[in-house]
Amino acid sequence: MEVSDNFQVLLNNPQLLPELKNVAEKVLHNQRITFDEGVLLYQKAELGYLGVLANYIREQKHGDKTYFNRNFHIEPTNLCVYDCKFCSYSRLLKQKSEGWEYTMEEMLDIVKKYDDQPVTEVHIVGGVLPQYDVAFYSELFTRIRRHRPDLHVKALTPVEYHYIFKKAKIDYATGMQMMKDAGLQSIPGGGAEIFHPEVRELISKDKCTGEQWLAIHEEWHKIGMRSNATMLYGHIEQFKHRVDHMERLRELQDRTGGFQTFIPLKFRNQDNQMSNVPESTVVEDLRNYAIARIYLDNFDHIKAYWAMISRTTAQLSLNFGVDDIDGTLDDTTKIYSMAGAEEQNPGMSTKELVELIKNAGRHPIERDTLYNVMTDYKDFQFADEVKPRYYKLPVIN
Ligand code: SF4
C-alpha cells in the first residue's frame, strides 16, 4: 500500500521520539509490536501519531469499507447472581422490583415481532440466574432456529456459560458442543472486562476468571466457530493491564484464528458502585481504539458501539482504526442507556447509519454476523431523504 503523506511527515519529524519512530517503522513494515511498545504508546503517543498509524492499518485491511449489521437484542433478565462493581444493569441487590425475567415464550414472542424485518442476527445477553440453565438455553436456541432458520443466533458470554456448565457438571468442551448442536452460531465478546486478576478481583471477582473466559472461547474456536472479544477500559485499570488484556487475546488468536472483532467498551459511571471513578475523555477513547488497531494485528475488525460513545465520536473513530459500527438497533437493549451512554433511546435506521458513515468519508457495507456482504451502500440511493438530527443553519461569509 502506498504510504500516505501523513505517514511520511510523521517519519520525517525530527522531534518524534526514537522509540515511537521505531514503532511507526514496524507498522509500516507489517511487524508486530511488543508488550512494552504497547505500554509506550499509551504513555507517550499523541493522538495525531496514533491516528496515522491506526488508519494506515485500517485502510490496508479494509480501505474505506465500514461495516454494520442489522440485529436486535433479547435481554432475558436484568437480575443477576453476580455483583460487578461497574454494572449499572443488574438489579438483584438493588431495586429488585425494577427487574424483569422473560419466559421462553416471551423471548420467542420478541423474535416473532421481527418476522417481517430484514434483520440477520439476534443478540442474546443479560444477567445470570439459576433458572436460565443449559436445558433452557438449548431449547431457546433450537426454537429460534426452527422458527426462523435465516436468523443468526449470537448468544451469551463465558460468564453465563461458565455458570451453567458448572451447575450441570459438564466441561467447557462438552458444553460448547451442546450449545452448537442446539443452534448457537457465534458468541459475542462480553464478560471480558479486564482479564488481569489485579483488576478483575476488584471489579468482578466472583464471575469467571480471565483464564476461564479465554478457555471457553478457545473450545468454541476449536469446533470451527467464531466469536468476538471486548475490553472494558477507562476505570481503575492501568495501561499495562489493557496491554496485558490485548496480549492474551492476540496470543489465543494466533493459536485459533477464531476471533472476528475486538470491541473496546468505554466504562460509564452512572448508577453503579464505581460512580466516583471519572470517565475517560473522547481523546482517550480515540487513542484506545487506535492502539487496539495497532496491537491486535491478527484481528480483522475493530468495532465501535455508536450508542455508547455517541454518533460524533463513532464517526471520528473511523479515522482511528475502527471499521465496524454496531449497528442498526432500536431500543431493545438497555445495557448502554442504563450505564449512562450518550444515547438514551439508541435507535438508528439503516438510512441514518449509512449517512453517518458516508458523511465521515467512508464506504458503508451491510454485513451479516460473519461479515458476508448483504448490501453495498456505496452508490445506493434511498427513496426518501434522511431527516438530519441537527438544524441546518445558513452559512454567513
Ligand atoms: S456485569 Fe454481567 S455478570 Fe456482572 S453483575 Fe452485571 S449482569 Fe451480572
Image: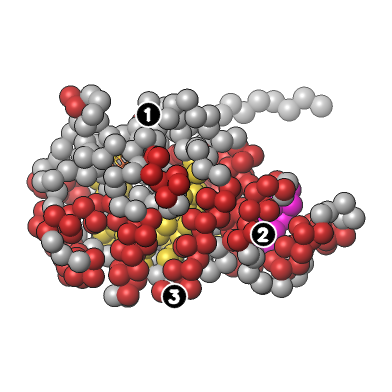
Q: Amino acid at mark 1?
A: Asn
Color encoding of the figure: secondary structure
Query: Which residues lie in the magenta part?
Result: 48-59
Which numbered disc covers residue 272?
1
Decide if residue 25 is in sight here.
yes
10 Å neighbourhood of mark 2: few (<14), some, or many (≥20)? some
**Element type where label 3 sits in the image:** helix
| The quarter of the picture showing ligand 1 | top left
Which part of the image, by quadrant, shows the C terminus?
top right
Q: Amino acid at mark 2?
A: Glu
Q: Mark 1 vs mark 3: which is more N-terminal?
A: 3
Q: Amino acid at mark 3?
A: Arg
Residue occupied by mark 2: 37
Q: Is residue 51 magenta?
A: yes
In the image, residue 113 lies at what x, y percent? 20, 45
Q: Residue furthest right?
A: 14
The front one of 70 and 192 is: 192
**Element type where label 2 sits in the image:** helix
Residue occupied by mark 3: 255
In the image, residue 383 lies at what x, y percent? 46, 47
From the viewer's perspective, tell me whether residue 151 is left or right of residue 37. left
Decide if residue 344 is in sight here.
no
The front one of 358 and 338 is: 338
Q: Is residue 372 magenta?
A: no
Q: CA distance from mark 1 to mark 2?
A: 34 Å
